[in-house]
Amino acid sequence: MPRVRRRDQAAVCVLLLAACLLLEGAAAAQPVVVPEATLPPSVEYQIKADFVYTVAKFVDWPDGAFASPSAPLTFGIVGSDVVADAISQALRGKKVHERPIRTVRVTDPRRALECQILYVSDADPVRIKALLDQVGAASILTIGEGGDFATRGGILGLRLSDTLVQFEVNMQSAQRAGIAISSKILRLGQVVGGVRPTSEGRK
């Protein structure tokens, strides 16, 4: 992984601190400022992985989503080597709900069904549709990039607007997958499918 300049390290620290404060409700109405243009891709995706990791701690999967109580949480990555390596590095050694995270590179849509989280770093609408069709109503938290990922049927869509990271939540897709998302997360994003519940998942 390329070395990160001191300026980039500072930017990462500022963003992660802001994200944590947001998720704790300290600044729920404010988006997170991301100096993305100054960051190399490896750092950008470490930031996004840490953000997704924090979100995952406020998500509940149905019991049948895991093979056993001790099974790991499988985090699937659809994207380039740089994306996969950066996300894997950021999540190494971490746990969600006491389950160790296992990262896998997903190059065949059929392998998406092995995951509890699927991160899609792909803007091609044909490939996105193939992935979402393959996932169907499986208990998988689908996360993608671009302004229309959630409207296409993904659960969580990340997008950039004037250097701000914002996200959209498709509640219909989450409910179809049996995934409960905490109101702490929901109040920070925009609901594009379904109705925002007053209380959901881990508070």
Image (spheres, grey):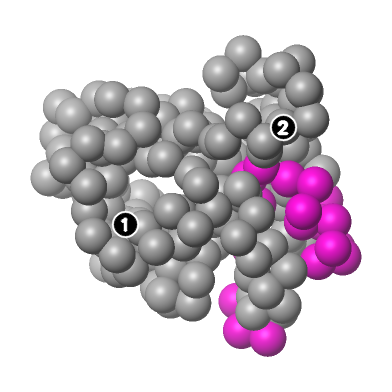
Residue at 73% across / 61% down in the picture? 79
| Viewer-proximal residue among 145 and 176 | 176
User: Callout 1: 10 Å neighbours few (<14), some, many (20+)?
Assistant: some
Residue 3 in view (yes/no)? no
Q: For residue 41, what is the image quadrant?
A: bottom right
In percent of width and height, residue 19 lies at 33, 35
Determine whether label 2 and label 1 are within 8 Å by CB: no
In percent of width and height, residue 156 lies at 45, 56
Query: Considering only vertical position in the picture, is 115 above or below 3?
Result: below
| Viewer-proximal residue among 194 and 130 | 194
Direction from residue 175 to residue 132 in the image, left or right: right
Q: Residue beneath label 1, please?
A: 166
Q: Is residue 110 magenta?
A: yes
Residue at 73% across / 69% down in the picture? 134
Magenta stretch bounds? 105-126
Q: Is residue 115 magenta?
A: yes
Q: For residue 106, what is the image quadrant?
A: bottom right
Direction from residue 113 to residue 123 in the image, left or right: left
